[in-house]
Image (spheres, coloured by chain):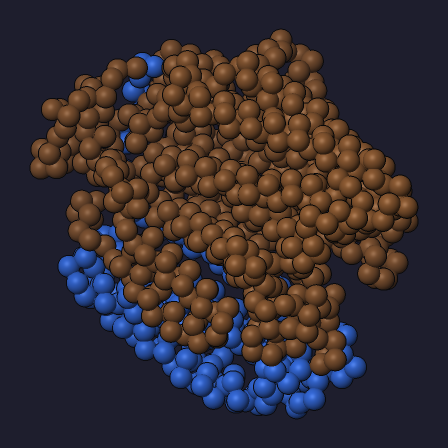
């Protein structure tokens, strides 16, 4: 790749006016584009940028910081549970710890980190220069950050949510919810859901409209399919938790009676609404993780994935079916038997598309020549662990068994196998796989292998015994247990094993820190992979591609490894991307792409202030609407952009 | 990696209408998520209604007048809304300016009538779950109405400035009209739920 032109070559805006990329010599083109798509230097640039790579990167870093916080709360819980009747942590703090652990893992780590990768990768993988609504993207990050900070600052001041990550009423309702704890939880949900919905909208519009010419539906990379399906699941699932958490806060703040059985309300209504979101939530985390697997696997077995169409249809089927399972979280609530049987059947049904994907991956490995690099190890670890989690899932989908193990450590073991095995392992594999693209340097393979084996072995040693503890009757969410229970030794074993997981993650972060500085230079395509993100430099320039690619094959870089077909005719004096037809990606428009702006941040501050205020008074929504409106108007008001001249 | 130019896109326009425009898809996605919110709130209404021995709980059915007046205004607004859409597609600036001013006024009318609509529910939000859910439904639609009227206002002002002359603004006006249709349709459904479900 030719180098980016130096400072002396930086063009002035006037000199650029009206220039198109047609026939421009590569170095000049890159200098022009670097000027047009630049993010200003320093703090101001950091605050105003709309570059999907910078925003995606900061999303990833923030999500991993929340992972550390949630992980440390788990370590604290294991410290307390290592012995019977230990007195390190009292019941009140313990309640906050498991609530903060679950809430953070689900709302502040798992969903955002999956979206973060999509924000970073989708434009690169589909051959465009930014997401469809770049300022909405920036806004979504700030809102997410403020929501996460808010709930952790509240925890630091002993106002940490303490009613579980699902915040059941009446425990979280006005009668029993202490102080403002459930309100902080409910508003954190509002922040993070606003952010997730914003990202879902921009992913859908980006994938539908901004794919490279020729990237018809049957040539979309499987990872992009997975995040597209996820975006739709977010679109239809997240409103449920926004509706329910708003009702909860209204019950607590202004005395509505949604969940009050003495005034015609119903406590189970909360569970229905929450799990209508909560079960798809699991798939919002899991579906992109399967996308990672489908992206990593072909590269390391050196052949296209087996059963492309089958995998796409499975992804879509999982997306649909994920909405038909929520009642299996409520089998112990005394629902009508016919309803329970229906949800048992639908819960078992989702094993079919999940199974199709697994068999396609196995067939891909079978037909290829596997290279056991670290990303591939995590993929194999995923398949092993997820299958175990899937099997216990089939077990708890059946009502009689579920009633026996409900609220025991068996369930804790099951969902950690599914979530850690099903999502975190592929995620770690994804970090190893795309780190070279993001940073320009390779992660250490040696540390990577240690990282994998410590996490994989440590995870199984920590969570497998929980199945047995659960079958022995140990309930979830207890801060201690009596010596006579006989659970002491196994709990000690689990607590010690959890330290192996901690060591594995410590190596992971160490590897990243060391490699950022000293890692081997990656080059454009270190894994010799087939998708478009590897056609540009590592790290990619602000404009992603100097010329937008044209796609003629499902594995574009394997079809034409040295010569990239591209389009010409785009402006270089204004940010411009291509929009095409939804099915066939035939170019229709040269659409402008929004420039840097401070208003997404200021709007997020206004929105965040209104949400925060509404924990204390409903009037915050009324008065907060004024700065919010000002923020949005300034955000959208056109400021004489060059593209308006056309 | 070397490049091989295979297509020239310089002739493509920079804006278009409907499904050709990414913004239209963004608007559709927002409509989908808001419609999901409405559907879940309506689901909650019927869930509570099924649980209750008598519905509405402890109150007469709401007074029909203000809600029906809003229904008439909103359904009638479809005509000017579609005219604005048509003029936007024809890129007729003078008519679009007129139309969007009319739509701004048409948007305020239901908000004014709504001042009488909340009392016409004949129950307070904190009296019982029935009161809570009808206030919730009406509150949701009011927020929805407020944001779109606000958006129409800003667009109306914009159309009278220098920026309004840019071709892309016509596409924005068209997307705004598309969203207004959703505001109208959602009220038809909510009106039936709030006013006629208790009378069944």
Q: Vertical placement of B34 versus A427: above or below?
A: below
User: How many numbered markers are drawn?
Assistant: 0
Judge by depth and name the residue closer to the eye, A321 or A104: A104
Q: Where is residue A227 in the image (x, y as percent from the top left)?
A: 54, 38
Left-right relation of A553 to A353: left
Residue A224 in the figure: left or right of residue A316: left
Q: Residue at x 25, y 45 (%)?
A: A44
In depth, the one of A529 and A496 nearer the eye is A496
Q: Residue A480: percent from the left, percent from the top?
A: 78, 49
**Relative to the observer, which residue lies in front, A228 or A604?**
A604
Farthest front residue?
Answer: A87
- Which residue sits at x=48%, y=35%? A117
The image quadrant of residue A633 is bottom left
Point out the image quarter for the N terminus of chain A: top left
Q: In the rendered image of this protein, which colour is used for chain B?
A: blue
Rendered shade, chain A = brown
Q: Which residue is drawn at 25% across and 39% down?
A: A42
In this rendering, would A357 be left or right of B100?
Answer: right
Please give the name of the residue rendered at 69% of the width and 18% of the height, measured from the top-left corner: A363
Between residue A89 and residue A359, name the one nearer to us.
A89
Q: In which quarter of the image is the C terminus of chain A?
A: top left
Tell me if A588 is positioned left or right of B140 in this view.
left
The answer, for residue A154, to whether it is visible in the render is yes
Can you give x and y, in whole percent of width and height, for residue A93 in the image? 65, 55
Q: Name, please, the residue furthest toward the top.
A: A369
| Residue farthest toward the left in the current orientation of the protein | A14
- Residue A341 place in picture, x, y as percent: 86, 52
- On screen, B170 above or below B80? above
Could one spot residue B172 in this view of the protein? no
């Amino acid at each position: 790749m030719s180098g980016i032109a130096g400072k002396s070559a930086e063009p002035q805006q006037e000199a650029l006016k009206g220039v198109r990329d047609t026939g421009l010599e590569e170095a000049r083109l890159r200098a022009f584009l670097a000027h047009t798509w630049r993010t200003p230097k320093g703090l101001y640039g950091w605050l105003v940028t709309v570059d999907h790579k910078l925003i995606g990167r900061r999303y990833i870093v923030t999500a991993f910081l929340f992972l550390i916080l949630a992980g440390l709360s788990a370590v604290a819980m294991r410290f307390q549970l290592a012995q019977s009747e230990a007195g390190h942590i009292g019941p009140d703090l313990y309640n906050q710890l498991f609530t903060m652990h679950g809430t953070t893992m689900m709302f502040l780590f798992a969903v955002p980190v999956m979206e973060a990768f999509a924000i970073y990768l989708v434009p690169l993988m589909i051959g465009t220069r930014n997401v469809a609504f770049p300022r909405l993207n920036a806004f979504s990050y700030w809102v997410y950050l403020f929501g996460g900070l808010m709930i952790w600052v509240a925890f630091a001041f002993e106002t940490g949510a303490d009613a579980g990550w699902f915040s059941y009423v009446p425990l979280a309702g006005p009668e029993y919810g202490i102080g403002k704890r459930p309100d902080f939880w409910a508003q954190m949900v509002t922040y993070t859901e606003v952010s997730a919905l914003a990202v879902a909208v921009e992913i859908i519009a980006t994938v539908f409209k901004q794919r490279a010419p020729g990237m018809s539906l049957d040539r979309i990379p499987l990872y992009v399919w997975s995040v597209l399906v996820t975006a739709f699941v977010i679109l239809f699932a997240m409103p449920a938790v926004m509706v329910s958490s708003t009702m909860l806060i209204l019950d607590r703040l202004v005395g509505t009676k949604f969940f009050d059985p003495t005034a015609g309300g119903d406590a189970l209504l909360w569970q229905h609404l929450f799990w209508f979101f909560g079960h798809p939530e699991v798939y919002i985390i899991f579906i992109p993780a399967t996308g990672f697997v489908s992206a990593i696997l072909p590269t390391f077995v050196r052949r296209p994935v087996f059963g492309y169409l089958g995998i796409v249809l499975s992804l879509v089927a999982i997306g649909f079916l994920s909405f038909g399972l929520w009642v299996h979280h409520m089998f112990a609530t005394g629902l009508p038997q016919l309803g329970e049987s229906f949800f048992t059947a639908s819960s078992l049904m989702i094993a079919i598309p999940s199974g199709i994907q697994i068999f396609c991956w196995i067939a891909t490995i079978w037909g290829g020549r596997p290279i056991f690099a670290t990303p591939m190890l995590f993929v194999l670890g995923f398949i092993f662990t997820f299958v175990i989690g899937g099997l216990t899932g089939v077990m708890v989908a059946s009502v009689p068994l579920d009633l026996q193990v409900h609220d025991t450590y068996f369930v804790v073991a099951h969902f950690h196998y599914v979530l850690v095995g099903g999502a975190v392992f592929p995620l770690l594999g994804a970090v190893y796989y795309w780190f070279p693209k993001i940073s320009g340097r390779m992660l250490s393979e040696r540390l990577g292998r240690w990282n994998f084996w410590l996490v994989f072995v440590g995870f199984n040693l920590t969570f497998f015994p929980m199945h047995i503890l659960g079958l022995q009757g140990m309930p979830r969410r207890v801060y201690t247990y009596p010596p006579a229970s006989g659970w002491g030794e196994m709990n000690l074993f689990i607590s010690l094993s959890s330290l192996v997981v901690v060591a594995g993650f410590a190596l992971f972060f160490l590897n990243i820190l060391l490699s950022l500085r000293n890692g081997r230079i990656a080059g454009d395509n270190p894994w010799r992979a087939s998708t478009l993100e590897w056609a540009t430099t590592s790290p990619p320039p602000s404009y992603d591609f100097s010329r937008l690619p044209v796609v003629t094959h499902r594995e574009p870089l394997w079809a034409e490894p040295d010569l990239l077909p591209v389009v010409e005719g785009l402006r270089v004096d204004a940010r411009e991307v291509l929009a095409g037809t939804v099915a066939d990606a035939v170019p229709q428009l040269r659409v402008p792409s929004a420039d840097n702006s401070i208003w997404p941040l200021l709007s997020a501050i206004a929105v965040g202030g209104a949400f925060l205020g509404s924990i204390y008074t409903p009037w915050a929504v009324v008065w907060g609407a004024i700065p919010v409106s000002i923020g949005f108007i300034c955000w959208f008001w056109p400021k004489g952009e060059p593209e308006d001249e056309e | 990696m070397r490049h091989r130019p295979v297509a020239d896109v310089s002739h493509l326009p920079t804006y278009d209408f409907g499904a050709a425009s990414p913004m239209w898809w963004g608007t559709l996605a927002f409509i989908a998520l808001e419609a999901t919110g409405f559907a879940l709130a309506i689901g909650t209404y019927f869930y509570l209604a099924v649980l209750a021995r008598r519905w509405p709980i402890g109150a007469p059915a709401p007074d029909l007048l203000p809600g029906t007046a809003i229904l008439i205004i909103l359904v009638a607004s479809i005509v000017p809304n579609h005219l604005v859409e048509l003029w936007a597609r024809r890129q007729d600036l003078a008519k679009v300016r007129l139309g969007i001013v009319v739509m701004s006024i048409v948007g305020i009318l239901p908000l004014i009538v709504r001042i009488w609509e909340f009392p016409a529910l004949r129950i307070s939000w904190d009296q019982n779950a029935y009161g809570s859910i009808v206030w919730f439904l009406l509150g949701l639609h009011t927020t929805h109405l407020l944001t779109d009227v606000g958006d129409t206002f800003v667009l109306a002002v914009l159309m009278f400035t220098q920026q309004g002359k840019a071709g892309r603004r016509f596409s924005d006006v068209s997307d705004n009209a598309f969203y207004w249709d959703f505001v109208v349709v959602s009220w038809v459904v909510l009106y039936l739920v709030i006013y006629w479900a208790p009378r069944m």
